[in-house]
Amino acid sequence: MSKDSTRRLDEFEKKTKAADKILGDISKKAAIAATAIAATGAAFAKMAIDFNSRLAKIETLIPGQTDRITELKKAIQDLSPEVRKATDDLTDGAYNIISAYGDADDTVRKLEISAKAASAGAATTNDAINLLSATVKAYGDTSAAAQQKVADLAFVTLRNGQTSFPELASSIQRVTSLSAELNISQEELFAVFSASTGVIGGAAEVSTRTAAAQRELLTGTDKLAAAFSDLGVKTGSELIQNFGGFQGALQALKTYADQTDQSITNLFGSAEAGQIALYLTGAGAEKFTKDLADMGDAAGALNTAFGAMTGGINEAGDAITQARLKQRCSLSASGTRRWKAQREYSMQLSPSPMPSQTWMRRP
């Protein structure tokens, strides 16, 4: 073989080795890309599967209503970016709303109110549902309008008191049924929390003391019975009704105690009951009166709080949150289909193994 032929063969072999290296690098990059795409597709599919699994849980409450589940699925996806809550949080909330009230035409509206309250109060949707349902069910009106009113009262309580939405939600449940039985208005109930939290304790302590006082008003102690008789009533409920509400009833008992040269705490059998009565008729009386007046103007408090959380100084961050939730809903809605399409695409990206170039080697 001539020197020229040998040189040409050497050059050709170098070029084929370089080509082999390039193709190898492409193959590796394609494999990495395919793996990443497959992982992304799997994540999309998982979102869709998790979402559908939660929807299936709702269907156990309304079996056989597949069309309704489809309606709720779309409503939740549409609602998610609007109320700044992920679909898993909303779907769990929808389950609890239907569990608490049954499914109705205003189910999605109730979910919207609870979710907005949760976003504005830095809580979960279920926290909000627990607060709203405990109140409206105790008072016998579970309509969306009744829940909007309770949400407004709750945010006046947060503004005027010293508590958090989750703490208020878990605490107020102790006193809603007792309050309704005694004909204590919702405005007065929430005013007790706004006036007392941060002074005689957190929401849990306020609810414990209030419940103690309410139970004694319902059952009556010997000393309370004497006070009732002097005030011309037979029961605590009648006292509240005849003296203009819970505040008026406590002030009537305070007047009776003063006239009989004793503290209002002596009329109650427990220290907890006596403490809340003493505070609301003494050091906290003025704040109780002011907060009660604010409760009368509570309409719109939820929307104001939600606007503050999603606008103002947090406007840019909220826009990112909203965009992320929109994207998440979009990907979840088509997760399985996207995953299949991307898996097929990733297969196309991976080139077939190139045959060995050993046939080019010199003998």
Image: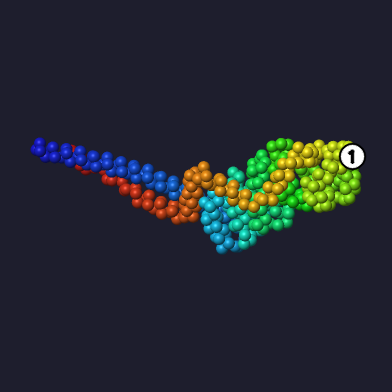
Which residue does the image show at 49% across and 43% down from the upper left?
Answer: 317
The quarter of the image holding the N terminus is top left
The quarter of the image holding the C terminus is top left
The residue indicated by pointer 1 is: 260
Q: Nearer the viewer, residue 127 or 163?
A: 163
State the SS at label 1. loop
Which residue does the image show at 47% across and 55% down from the upper left?
Answer: 334
Q: Nearer the viewer, residue 205 or 38?
A: 205
Residue 223 % position (x, y): 89, 42
Q: Nearer the viewer, residue 56 or 17?
A: 56
* Vertical comparison of 56 with 305: above or below: below
Which residue does the image show at 81% across and 37% down from the upper left?
Answer: 271
Residue 224 % position (x, y): 87, 44
Three-letter code for the amino acid on which mark 1 is drawn: Thr
Q: Nearer the viewer, residue 137 or 29?
A: 137
Q: Is residue 133 left or right of residue 39?
A: right
Question: Can the viewer see residue 60?
Answer: no
